[in-house]
Amino acid sequence: MKVKGEIVGYKGVVEEEERREEMEEIVAVPKKYTVVGGFPQTHPMKVVVVGYALTSKKIKSFLQPKLEGLARNKGILFVAIDESRPLADQGPFDIVLHKDYRMKHPDVTVLDPPDAIKHVYNRQSMLQDVAALKFSDAYGKVCVPRQLVIEDDPSSIPAAVSKAQLRFPLVAKPLVAKSHELSLAYDELSLQILEPPLVLQEFINHGGVMFKVYIVGEAITVVRRFSLPDVSRRELSKNAGVFRFPRVSCAAASADDADLDPRVAELPPRPLLERLARELRRRLGLRLFNLDIIREHGTKDRYYVIDINYFPGYGKMPEYEHVFTDFLLSLVKHK
């Protein structure tokens, strides 16, 4: 069987018969012509078959009915990959993501290789490419917070922080980026209750607003999200301990329609984001990721990238169905 195309994708199982019937239904309907935009076409619409192997959580958030409906209208069919069976016995697929498949079929182009994904799952290496850019232009400067990696032994954290001369408060994040839980530590003594492996980042006051920059190929979408509030020096001197936050950025925390100070709410300049995204696509080797960016409070053009997420929750991105289906079609078109 010949498998065409590039690679995108995901986790789940469908029965072979259901898969065949679904594909035949879409392919067989326009036998003589297909109506596209009101005009009959002499050739049927090419069906782009996307094989996926996503977690059940990702399937629920990403493969929403609106996306699948729009995809069908554009000639895109999502098909779950049965990981209990050889991939070569399934399909044929135009677009697939499967790391074992890449090793067995080196002629197939892989979108977002596993090694590149692994690079951003580790918070020690995640921001290295941003730091290496030393990014600065007429629209602003992009930095990363000073940070320290703690592999083990909680009792060693205070001394390590003192030696690194990190300033409080510190944001503590799990070293592996699959968890979004974080803590805010106000003093040195309380650091010993944290659980390594973790990353400690200097907290940057940013007006309580974060910019989530979604990247899908060359498309960029920016949304505002509420974040941790600023911490004043007075507040820092009066508080001690570690405060835990299960998940700061979520769909309910959208700040796009909130009445915010314009100096806080103003989105980063588009040219700056386009150049930053272009550089990181090249350095990271990824096309499906998002950046969590903050603007240092009291500045107009000093930004920090505080996190990078691979294949983020696109279901929370406005018009993600159109952006993502256009991206899939572009992969096939430029093959």
Image: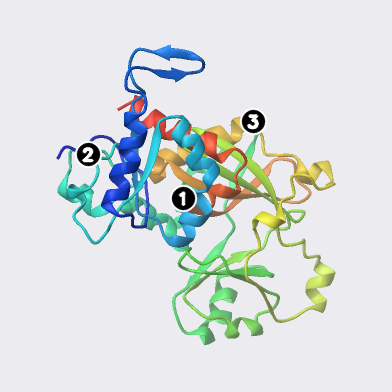
Q: Secondary structure at mark 1?
A: loop
Viewer-side residue, 231 vs 96: 96
Q: Nearer the viewer, mark 3 or mark 1?
A: 1
Place of residue 240 in the rendered image (x, y in percent of width and height, measured from the top left): 74, 81
Q: What kind of residue is marked 1?
A: Phe
Say which label, 2 or 1, has the lower sequence index. 2
The residue where tag 3 is placed is 138
Q: Quadrant of the C terminus?
A: top left
Relative to 70, 262 lies left or right: right
* Rendered view: 277 above or below 161: above
Say which label, 3 or 1, has the lower sequence index. 3
Q: Secondary structure at mark 3?
A: loop
Q: CA distance from mark 3 to mark 1?
A: 30 Å
Checking the image for residue 38, the label placed there is none
Place of residue 86 in the rendered image (x, y in percent of width and height, measured from the top left): 18, 55
* Residue 237 lies in quadrant: bottom right
Say which label, 2 or 3, has the lower sequence index. 2
Q: What kind of residue is marked 2?
A: Val
* Rendered view: 88 above or below 153: above
- Res. 289 in view: yes
Q: What kind of residue is marked 3?
A: Ala
The residue where tag 1 is placed is 311
